[in-house]
Image (spheres, rainbow, N blue to C red):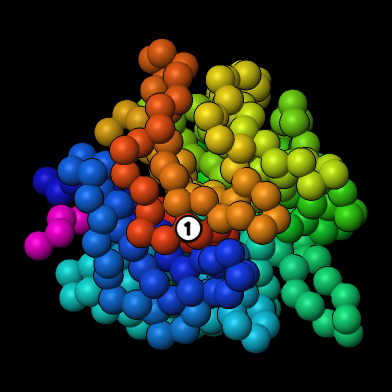
């Protein structure tokens, strides 16, 4: 559309673990930030995706009181938010991806009777009918804290927590046959990692946490055509609950947390040609983690 790609960061938690309503845009091409219209509620551990019409969907997440099934849609032309049909279940820590004009939300958890209850459900949103429906469940009993991307005609889920343990499992959902399958395991088991499709089609799974609350800087790339994992150079900073996106041939990783108490405001980017990471001169306006992150087209004016 002749507009530059930018990275949109929605909600998230600060050092005090308080959900936010702010929506921040980072433009790598101009090294600038600006703020969009805030959401009508504060949210963290939500999922956000950009659709083909450049609108942004924010699904589920953790509010200041509990998990929610609210879904909001942002229209960049008018800088406005609207509520759309809610999810069938309230949940946080889900994987979210967009494919073929539909939004997919998988896994997650909710808090009930003093316990964290994980889910294995997958819901699909149809933009034309403004409705959600259940599709084939995940091929595991439960999953939350995973990362999720769409490549070609399938949706892929990486890592997370299953059966109360960090997992290196990788799952694929095929909307055409409404079936799920397990693929080659990641080399590193982890949750709260972020993932995006790189400039040459590889899926990069970045950072996260492993057993013992160990924060990671490891980066592994998955080839969906060969079902093979490739080891890549680790980030400069260990990060969990960060956001990421590929813009103009570089992969940017924003914010996150390096310890349970410390949020990050730093940004670093990866060059696939040289397999190197570089700290960006810019920093987020506020240290934040657990936010929705997506790449869209927009210019400041």
Report the residue marked by disc 1.
287
In this rendering, the answer to whether 165 lies above or below 85 is above
Residue at position x 62%, y 33% from top? 217
Tell me: 199 left or right of 94. Answer: left
Outermost residue to the top: 274
Tell me: 179 left or right of 291. Answer: right
Q: Secondary structure at mark 1?
A: loop
Rendered location of residue 160, percent (x, y): 73, 49
In which image quadrant can residue 186 be found? top right
Rendered location of residue 56, percent (x, y): 36, 65
In this rendering, the answer to whether 67 lies above or below 292 is below
Rendered location of residue 32, percent (x, y): 22, 50
In this rendering, the answer to whether 196 lies above or below 24 is above
290 or 202: nearer the viewer: 290
Q: How many marks?
A: 1
177 or 10: nearer the viewer: 10
The C terminus lies in which quarter of the figure?
bottom left
Rendered location of residue 15, percent (x, y): 58, 64
Q: Find out whether residue 123 is within the magenta segment.
A: no
33 or 76: nearer the viewer: 33
In which image quadrant can residue 300 be found? bottom left
Residue at position x 28%, y 76% from top? 37
Residue 199 in view (yes/no): yes
Residues in magenta, as a range: 296-301
143 or 116: nearer the viewer: 116
Tell me: 53 left or right of 283. Answer: left
* Mark 1 Cα shell of 10 Å, populated few (<14), some (14-19), many (≥20): some
In this rendering, the answer to whether 272 lies above or below 91 is above
In which image quadrant can residue 50 be found? bottom left
SS majority, magenta: loop
Residue at position x 23%, y 44% from top? 31
Residue 296 in view (yes/no): no
């Amino acid at each position: 559309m002749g507009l530059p790609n930018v990275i949109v960061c929605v909600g998230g938690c600060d050092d005090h673990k308080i959900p936010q309503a702010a929506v921040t845009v980072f433009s790598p091409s101009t090294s600038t930030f600006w703020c969009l219209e805030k959401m009508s509620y504060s949210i963290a551990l939500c999922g956000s995706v950009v659709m083909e019409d450049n609108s942004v969907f924010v699904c589920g997440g953790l509010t200041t009181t509990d998990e929610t099934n609210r879904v909001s849609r942002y229209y960049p032309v008018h800088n406005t938010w609207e509520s759309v049909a809610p999810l069938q279940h309230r949940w946080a820590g889900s994987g979210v991806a967009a494919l073929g004009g539909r939004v997919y939300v998988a896994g997650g958890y909710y808090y009930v009777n003093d316990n964290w209850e994980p889910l294995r459900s997958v819901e699909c949103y149809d933009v034309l009918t403004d409705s959600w429906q259940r599709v084939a469940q995940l091929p595991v009993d439960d999953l939350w804290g995973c990362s999720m991307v769409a490549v070609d005609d399938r949706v892929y889920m990486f890592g997370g927590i299953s059966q109360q343990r960090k997992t290196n499992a990788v799952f694929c959902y095929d909307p055409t046959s409404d079936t799920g399958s397990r693929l080659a395991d990641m080399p590193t088991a982890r949750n709260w990692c972020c993932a995006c499709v790189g400039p040459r089609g590889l899926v990069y799974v970045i950072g996260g946490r492993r057993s013992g609350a160990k924060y990671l800087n490891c980066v592994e790339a998955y080839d969906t055509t060969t079902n093979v994992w490739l080891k890549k150079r680790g980030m400069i900073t260990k990060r969990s609950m960060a956001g990421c996106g590929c813009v103009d041939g570089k992969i940017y990783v924003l914010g996150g947390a390096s310890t349970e108490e410390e949020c990050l405001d730093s940004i670093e980017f990866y060059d696939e040609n040289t397999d190197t990471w570089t700290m960006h001169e810019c920093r987020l306006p506020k240290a934040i983690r657990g936010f929705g992150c997506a790449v869209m087209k927009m210019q400041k004016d």
